[in-house]
Amino acid sequence: MAEPIRVFIVEDEPRIARFLQIELEHEGFQAETEANGRRAFERIVQENHDIVLLDVMLPDMDGMEICRRVREVSSIPIIMLTARDEIEDKVNGLDIGADDYMTKPFAIQELLARIRAALRKHAPRDTVSGEEKLVVRNLVLYPSRYEVQVKGENVELTKKEYSLLEYLMRNKRMVLTRDQILQKVWGYDYVGDTNVVDVYIRYLRAKIDDKFQDKYIHTVRGVGYVIKE
Ligand code: CA
């Protein structure tokens, strides 16, 4: 699936936010903006962005706090945008789990390079073959081959089971609601029971967690599911 990469721009300076959005869309990314810190945190957790550009000084909740709180639930790549050349901010940014930082003003080409590097780091490629693989402990998924292995042993999955597992693994540590899963795996036009998600989670657990006696897929009561290390 060649869906555009979704960049979430958290920036309260409208001119900078607009500039970044235009430049990123020009490069083929899908870009959304948010100026309020607290709303930004909520949207990062609830929506499915691929990478976050995070300003430090923001109304309601600052970028450091947002980063720290997001890291409790998600491994989404985060690039901090610091206003001045503040050494302390840089150190702090990386301390609290940011993947990278940039000092404003910066050249857009450099930002694009950093974005691509952060995304590559997030989806590590096999060091020998160079192919992408998603890894959660002993569970490995190879998107280019539609293959799943646990401890090197192949796991046979149906197309839907595979899509569901890939979606969970691409968002590991992030709690996904049944609605999010339905929209992403079954499609926006799916009409039917949301129970279908629970049914397929059961199929996956039987083939992975139960078979290999190792818990990967966790239920978050009243919310949804998460796959964790
Ligand atoms: Ca700001």
Image (cartoon, rainbow, N blue to C red):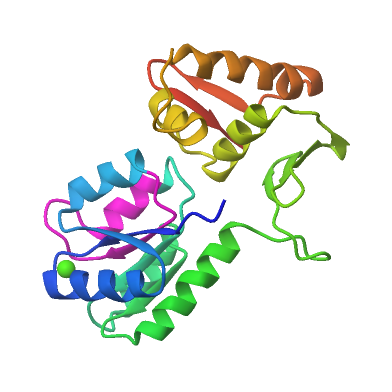
Of 30 and 223, which appears nearest the observer? 30
> How many marks can you see?
0
Q: Position of residue 127 (x, y in %)?
A: 78, 65
Residue 23 in view here: yes
Picture layout, residue 173 above or below residue 196: below
Picture layout, residue 65 above or below residue 42: below
Residue at point 13%, 70% (across, down): 13
Q: Is residue 49 magenta?
A: yes
Using residue 180 as the reference point, say whether residue 161 is left or right of it.
right
Q: Which residues are magenta?
A: 48-70
Q: Is residue 1 magenta?
A: no
Of 214 and 148, which appears nearest the observer? 148
Q: Position of residue 54 (x, y in %)?
A: 30, 63
Q: Quadrant of residue 102?
A: bottom left
Residue at point 26%, 85% (across, down): 105
Q: Quadrant of residue 213?
A: top right
Q: Quadrant of residue 138?
A: top right
Residue 176 in view here: no
Q: Position of residue 146 (x, y in %)?
A: 74, 43
Question: Ligand 1 is located in which of the four quadrants?
Answer: bottom left
Using residue 187 as the reference point, say whether residue 108 is left or right of it.
left
Considering every residue shown, the one lying at the far right of the view is 153
Q: Position of residue 97 (x, y in %)?
A: 45, 57
Picture layout, residue 41 above or below residue 6: above
Residue at point 67%, 17% (across, down): 203
Quarter holding the C terminus is top right
Residue at point 58%, 35% (across, down): 228
